[in-house]
Image (cartoon, helix red, strand yellow):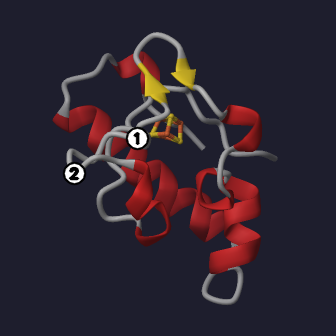
Amino acid sequence: MSFPCTKCGQCCMNISKVEQLIDYHSGNGICIFYRENVGCKIYQNRPDVCRIDEGYIKFFSSHMSIQEFYQKNAQVCNQLQEEKGMNQQYRVVL
Ligand code: SF4
């Protein structure tokens, strides 16, 4: 199973708390490579922390199982979407 990302873009617009992406925003938390209705401009070359499975292996595999990691990610995705009033169609369902 891979993480069922719905490409809502909320993770790209809320990176201010991600230590590894400190140089990827201009103080507003929105990634400088994110374009509305387009998505990530550097998708093929995006950092590991932006890749769910690679990010898990590199940063979180010693702390939790992949299932737990997916659950935590899905919670954050859905919470960000709800805060922005996004349509239900974007919710991540595991
Ligand atoms: S917030 Fe979640 S569902 Fe939305 S683009 Fe990021 S990983 Fe995908």
Report x, y in % for residue 87: 32, 16
Residue 35 occupies which quadrant of the picture? top left
Above/below status of 87 relative to 51: above
Q: Which label belongs to residue 27? A: 2
Residue shown at 36% from the left, 52% from the top: 15
Q: Secondary structure at mark 1?
A: loop
Q: Is residue 67 above or below residue 82?
A: below
Report the residue marked by disc 1.
31
- Residue at (43%, 50%) from the top-left corner? 24
> Would you say 70 lies left or right of 15 here?
right
CA–CA distance in space, label 1 to label 2: 10 Å
Q: Residue at x 40, y 16 (%)?
A: 36
Horizontal placement of 22 versus 48: left or right? left
Does ligand 1 reach within 8 Å of label 1's beta carbon? no
The C terminus - image quarter: top right
The residue positioned farthest toward the right in the image shown: 1
Can you give x and y, in whole percent of width and height, for residue 11 in the image?
Answer: 42, 43
Give the percent coordinates (x, y) of residue 70.
60, 58
Indicate the secondary structure of the residue bearing disc 2. loop
Cβ(mark 2) to ligand 1 < 8 Å? no
Rendering coords of residue 57 (x, y %): 76, 72
Is 82 on the left-hand or right-hand side of 22? left
User: Could you say which is closer to the camera, residue 35 or residue 56?
Assistant: 35
Image height check: is 46 above or below 82? below
Discs 1, 2 touching: Cβ within 8 Å: no
Local crowd size for mark 2, using a 10 Å CA cut-off: few (<14), some (14–19), many (≥20)? few
Residue at the extreme bottom = 62
